[in-house]
Amino acid sequence: MRQEKILLAVSDTQIKEQLKDTLKSSGYMVYTVGDGASALRLSKSIVPGAAVVDEVLSGINGMTVSDILAGEGISPVIIMATAGTYRATGTHRDGIAYLIKPVSNYTVLETLNSLLKHERKMGVPTGKTKKPGGKPDLRRQLNAAKSYLMENEGYTEEEAHRYIQKTAMDFSISMEQAVQNIIDMYKNKKGCHKTT
């Protein structure tokens, strides 16, 4: 059986190294990053079997990274979040398992093992999560579009959101269509330029 690729996105170096050691000693091939943009870039090149993401990441936060990874079907996600974040976001989101911090390395490992076992049982190919209806919801798409703008154009999250709203108004299209156009543009490796 081949080694399962795991993306580990944690900004705290000590926690990241401890988790990496725990996962590697259990037979996983672990790729580590410390910020949100790097997590998204690396996930698209390695297509991990699962991702373990801390909610606290520089640049693009862990919640947005998780939404994109699960929403675009790149990989299922275990997110390490505070109790407050967990309550604010709800108890269930497709493709995302929550662990409330502080969390032990053993708990992360056991959750990862269960998640991957469930994915295999459901017949989901490695590195691809199931998407209900074959399409992520608008919130996930909006987060993905904002992420592309933040990563490629240097926008803050607020600037990216305003840009999307302005695009929808300027072209008399729905917000959903503006979001989809931005996602398509970056997926096709076309550029857009920051406007004031």
Image (tube, rainbow, N blue to C red):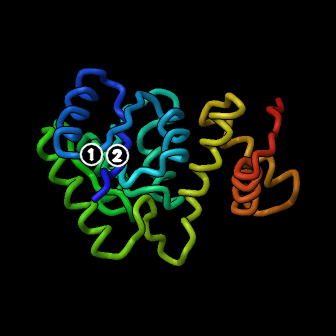
Instruction: Identify the mark nearer the N-term, 1 or 2.
Output: 2
* Residue that appears at 46% across and 36% down: 61
Mark 1 and mark 2 in contact? Answer it, CB < 8 Å. yes
In the rendered structure, which amino acid carries the disc numbered 1?
Answer: Tyr
Q: Element under label 2? A: strand
Q: Position of residue 34 (x, y in %)?
A: 41, 27
- Quadrant in the rendering for residue 184: bottom right
* Residue that appears at 17% across and 37% down: 22
* Residue that appears at 75% across and 62% down: 177
Please, which residue is most extreme toward the top here? 13
- Quadrant in the rendering for residue 75: bottom left
Q: CA distance from mark 1 to mark 2?
A: 7 Å
Which numbered dot is residue 28? 1
Q: Please tell me whether mark 1 or mark 2 is closer to you in this view.
A: 1
For disc 2, the marked residue is 6
**Local crowd size for mark 2, using a 10 Å CA cut-off: few (<14), some (14–19), many (≥20):** many
Q: Position of residue 106 (x, y in %)?
A: 11, 43
In the rendered structure, which amino acid carries the disc numbered 2?
Answer: Ile
The one nearer the camera, 139 or 144, is 144
94 in relation to 81, above or below: below
In the image: residue 121, left or right of residue 134? left
Quarter of the picture holding the N terminus: bottom left
Q: Element under label 1? A: loop
Q: Position of residue 10 (x, y in %)?
A: 34, 32
172 in relation to 33, above or below: below
In the image: residue 11, left or right of residue 14? right
**Local crowd size for mark 1, using a 10 Å CA cut-off: few (<14), some (14–19), many (≥20):** some
Quarter of the picture holding the C terminus: top right
* Residue that appears at 81% across and 49% down: 167
